[in-house]
Image (spheres, grey):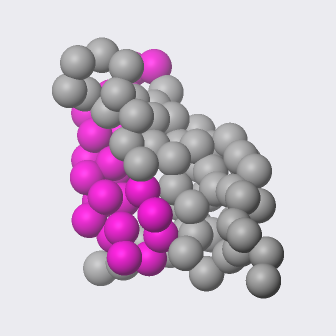
Amino acid sequence: MALDLDELLEGAPSYGVIDARDGYLIYSRAGHQDAFDRLAAEIEASAGAFEVIPLREDGDRCDRLFIAPLNEGKSFAPRR
C-alpha cells in the first residue's frame, strides 16, 4: 500500500515534520525510535511516489528522512 503524502505530513507522536525548500524532513521523536524505524521502512518502500534520502546520525540507525515529491519542480532544477 502506498503512503498518502498529505497524511504523512500531518506528523504523529513518533515523528515530526519540517517543511524544507524542496521537500520535507521527517524526524524521529525521542522515545519512539522503534515506531519511527517501521515508518522509515514503509516510506523507503514507497520511494516510487517520492524521492527518499535516509539520514543517519547513529551508526546504521536512521533518525531522519528527507522526502521530495516527484511531481513538483525543484528550486535547483535548470530552467528551460
What percent of the width, then of the height, locates residue 76? 72, 58
Compare residues 31 and 43 and report the one nearer the observer: 43
Compare residues 34 and 52 and report the one nearer the observer: 52
Q: Height in image: 67 above or below 32?
A: below
Residue drawn at point x = 51 percent, y = 35 percent: 27
Residue drawn at point x = 31 percent, y = 58 percent: 44
Q: How many marks?
A: 0
Query: In which quadrant will I find the C terminus?
Result: bottom right
Q: Height in image: 49 above or below 12?
A: below
What percent of the width, then of the height, locates residue 66? 51, 47
Q: Height in image: 17 above or below 48?
A: above
Q: Where on the picture, by quarter, is residue 1?
A: bottom left
Residue drawn at point x = 37 percent, y = 19 percent: 57
> Is 74 a magenta residue?
no
Residue drawn at point x = 71 percent, y = 46 percent: 20
Q: What range of the chain is rendered magenta? A: 30-52
Left or right: 46 as drawn, with respect to 66:
left
Q: Height in image: 79 above or below 58?
A: below
Compare residues 51 and 27 and report the one nearer the observer: 51
What percent of the width, then of the height, locates residue 72? 68, 76
- Residue 35 visible somewhere in the drawing: no
Compare residues 59 and 36 and report the one nearer the observer: 59
- Residue 62 visible somewhere in the drawing: yes
Considering every residue shown, the one lying at the far left of the view is 60
> Is 44 a magenta residue?
yes
Left or right: 12 as drawn, with respect to 38:
right
Q: Where on the picture, by quarter, is residue 43?
A: bottom left
